[in-house]
Amino acid sequence: MSRLVIAPLVVALVGVVVMLALGRRPRLQRTASGGIGVSYAATVAVAVWSVVLSPGAPGATAYQVGGWPAPFGITLILDGLSAFMLVITATIGLATLVFSLVSIDQEVQRVHYHPLFHVLLLGVTGAFLTGDLFNLFVWFEVMLLSSYIFVAFYGEGRHTAASFRYLVLNVVGSALMLLGVGGLYAVTGTLNMADMSRRLADPMAFGIEVTPVIGLTALLLAVFALKAGLVPFQFWVPEAYTAAPLPVTAMFAGVTKKVGIYAIVRLYFTVFGGMSLQIDIPVLPIDSPHALLASVLLGMGVASILIGGLGAVSRETVEETFAYSSVGQVGFIAIPVAIGAASAGFLQRLALAAAFVYILHHSLAKGMLFLVAASISNAIGTNRVADLGGLSRCSPVLAGSFFVGVLSLIGLPPLAGFFGKFLVFDAAVRQYATTGGGTALTTLLVLLTGAVLTIIYATRLWTRIFWGTETPAVQEAVFDGRELTVIAVLAATVVLVGVGFEPVYEFAETAATAALDQEGYVDIVDPVGGVST
């Protein structure tokens, strides 16, 4: 059973090696890339079903690379939280890979596109499965390595400039992350997350001075917020999203941004969730990492919703609109995580489940919408809103898929976005009913404002692109049926997630429970005596 944990990572690694080996045989490379994408998705499905979802499944298991026991060896863990994120990765990864095969010029694909894509997939997979902090840093770097090149992929001046700024910003972030990881190792004496959780829950027994942990966790929070594109670290998002190939941007928005959110949840709830301390910080009543997370992440989420939403309202191109929209939408994920950090019991679990449902909805809808932008660009040669019009008559399938995507962002039933937004509002209302106060009320007002801003920019795009008189460019457009098939499948998935929401919510609850189960996490890894399978 434990070998299923490493299987998705092995498939992704094999994909990188095969893509490099077939570099001089582009047709065979493209065929192999698609086959490995399907194999990766199938491997994730088998692993998740066998370990987490099937009747009688253990719920979680760990794999020790090389047979070295924890906390000394490299630990990989598959539980409800990592399984939920891997399913999203496999879904969006396969869709964007297939779309790339049929939409990106074959000569462009020869320029290491497929090796880079599988390196990106490898980094994301490793980040979701790793059980120690240093390897979380390593997998972040693997993921970013391909991201840098993808942003500069087309080689023009603006792409190179965007990639350079993205590189500098993330190199600084990586240095700070390494500093935070090293600091936690110095304080706790371990890098294994289960072992660290065990030690921080009883610091006296291990001779740990826990006061520095607050500062170190704040450092990591800033780094992960940078990776997630939360305000005030959002300024890389519009440039990077508009510079990279649009299928890759769909992967960025649908998957890689969520790695930062995953890291916040995993560390603050699973690793740091059992510790508490008394520390006097002016203005902020902080006595635990949860209190720090609740205060800081709530502010970031509120600012992200407002800045991202306002930025999306007046953008000139489709991809710019969706790039700023992604900044705003990640705020709808950050706020329930912050509510979960400030709560306990049922509300805490509900808030985390709401965040996971919103992650799923946003990954599917925004990933699909970026593919719509790619299809429009391929067929018409531009994504400028002013140059588009009447697309609904030109391609009803594209129009219908786009309509489903923006309605899901707005949050209309029975689409996936309705349940995501409903649960976020539900968590915020319950927090207000429990605590009252101006902060909870402000949070509700900001969520409502963000929902209104989403309606404004979504309606603007729909009316100006798909309604009205066909522009000359649209009249001559010919859309690729294979691209439209991928887009339509994702649109259908958005509908199916909403229509069949009960098992989706149960999966999200499983992820939330796994994030909160510190004792179970420690028992699975068994950092004292080896691996529990």
Image (cartoon, rainbow, N blue to C red):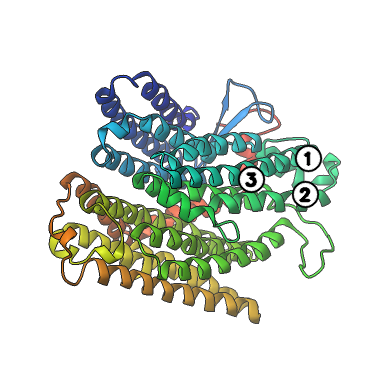
Whether residue 394 is visible here, answered yes or no, is yes
Q: Secondary structure at mark 2?
A: helix
Q: Secondary structure at mark 3?
A: helix
Residue 234 in the image, given as x and y percentages of width and height: 55, 57
In the drawing, what numbered circle is on residue 213? Answer: 2
Marked residue nearer the N-terminal end (2 or 3):
3
Q: How far apart, in angstroms, are the residues tagged by discs 3 and 1? A: 22 Å
Mark 1 neighbour class, 10 Å CA radius: few under 14, some 14 to 19, many 20 or more: many
Mark 1–mark 2 CB contact (< 8 Å): yes
| Residue at image mark 3 | 173
Vertical order, 88 against 137 (above or below):
below
Nearer the observer, 29 or 420 = 29
Q: Amino acid at mark 2?
A: Val
Q: Amino acid at mark 3?
A: Gly
Quadrant of residue 498 in the image? bottom left
Q: How far apart, in angstroms, are the residues tagged by discs 2 and 3? A: 18 Å
